[in-house]
Amino acid sequence: MDVNQKVGTVLIVDDDDQVRHTLRRLLTRQGIESILEASDGSEAIYVAAKCQPDVVVLDAAMPYMSGGLAAPFIRKQAPEAKIIAFSGQLETKPAWADAFLVKGAETLLEVLMEVMAEPVVS
């Protein structure tokens, strides 16, 4: 299956440059070509409004504006986007996310496919 047919644009939001770089490489290897980045929640809101991503991989804990604070604004700016909470601190999916992934897990592509198959949380 061509991943780009289900996942057009992915926005990676994390305050750690290395994490964003690693996710970008992983997604690129899987054939996803349109990958955007933001380093905090406020930047993510701006990028989401401008670029309308299909999926947002959103770090839950960031300085300036956490994923939990940014998620409702991202949903208003890009209502069709699926949000994946991405955290090393959370143990379960937060209410603001469509899916949850623990940092360090190697199943991001599987989660992306599962999330794209489900309706958006309102």
Image (cartoon, rainbow, N blue to C red):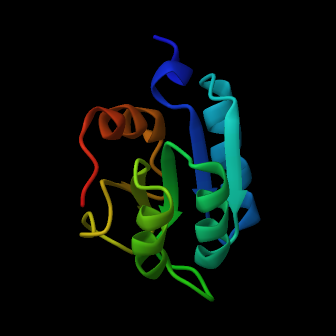
Q: Is residue 27 above or below residue 56?
A: above
**Residue at image location 50% in from the left, 31% down from the top:** 7
Q: Is residue 106 above or below residue 90?
A: above
| In-front residue for pair 36/91 | 36
Percent position of residue 107, x then y:
42, 38
The quarter of the displayed image where residue 71 is located: bottom left
**Residue at image location 61% in from the left, 86% down from the top:** 63
Percent position of residue 47, x then y:
66, 61
Horizontally, is 99 left or right of 14 in the view? Answer: left
Residue 87 seen anywhere in this rendered image of the structure? no
**Residue at image location 62% in from the left, 78% down from the top:** 42
**Residue at image location 37% in from the left, 40% down from the top:** 111
Q: Is residue 88 above or below residue 32?
A: below
| In-front residue for pair 49/20 | 49
Percent position of residue 35, x then y:
68, 42
Horizontally, is 108 left or right of 27 in the view? Answer: left
Q: How many marks?
A: 0
| In-front residue for pair 77/68 | 77
Q: Is residue 2 above or below residue 25?
A: above
In the rendered view of the protein, which quadrant contains the N terminus? top left
Q: Outermost residue, bottom direction? A: 64
Residue 116 seen anywhere in this rendered image of the structure? yes
The quarter of the displayed image where residue 48 is located: bottom right
Q: Outermost residue, top direction? A: 1
In the rendered view of the protein, which quadrant contains the C terminus? bottom left
Percent position of residue 66, x then y:
51, 81
